[in-house]
Image (cartoon, grey):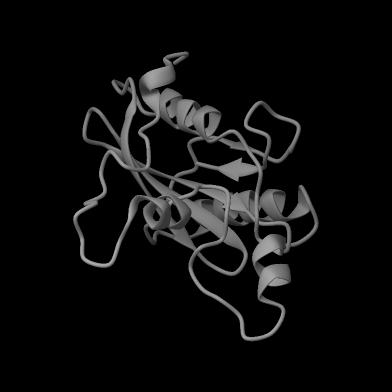
Amino acid sequence: MGNKNSVPSPHTWLDSTSPGTDSQELTRRHDPHSYTSGRWLNRDELERNSRHVMFDFSVLCERAVHTCPGATSVVKYEKREGGFNRVFLLTMDNGHCVVARVPTGIAGPPRLTTNSEVATITYLQSKISLPIPKILDWNDNPSNPAGTEYII
């Protein structure tokens, strides 16, 4: 778990030969901390900064590896973004994939949003038979080693 090589660099799985891309653009688009999915016509910098999340991505990856039996490292990741959350699709060296979800600062009241989401998923799993993702790990304290709230 303490393996510093357990986190892939953003360039390990990207095709840097794609037309119209350079290494700086690839790094910006796949930065785990910054909002990179769009722009605003008005107050662009303010909107993007409000969705910036500082956290230790390598610790988040280590937590994900810990929840996946037989995995020793993350071999690639993909970042997806919405207005309130950042989601990482983490592929492990054993072929399994887990999803790590990190809220942005505008998602709602700290701790309450994550607690509400975990409680809602747990309740639904106990009441209905629809396939609902299993929560492998979560933490609502932004002072945890990852430095942010998360749900895996």
Q: Closer to the camera, 144 or 46?
A: 46
Taking the spot 21% from the left edge, 35% from the top edge, the residue there is 95
Nearest to the observer: residue 113 or residue 55 = 55
Count every numbered label the image shows and give the total. 0
Locate residue 70: give its quadrant.
top left
Name the residue furthest right: 109
Which residue is more in the foreground, 12 or 117?
12
Q: Where is 92 relative to 82, above or below?
A: above
Please tell me which residue is depicted at 38% across the width and 24% down the height of the picture.
Answer: 6
Q: Position of residue 53 (x, y in %)?
A: 65, 49
Q: Seen in the image, is 2 located left or right of residue 122? A: left
Residue 8 x %, y %: 35, 33
Quadrant (top left/top right/bottom left/bottom right) for the N terminus: top left
| Rendering coords of residue 79 (x, y %) | 42, 53
| 18 on left or right of 75 | left
- 139 versus 35 height, above or below: above
Residue at 54% x, 28% y is 59
Name the residue at the top extreme.
2
**At x 35% / y 50%, what residue is drawn?**
23
**Does residue 70 sit above or below 25 in this rendering?**
above
In the rendered view, does 147 fall on the left or right side of 81? right
> Residue 21: horizontal and vertical position, in percent?
30, 61
| Viewer-closest of 74 and 54 | 54
Classify residue 20 as left or right of residue 102: left
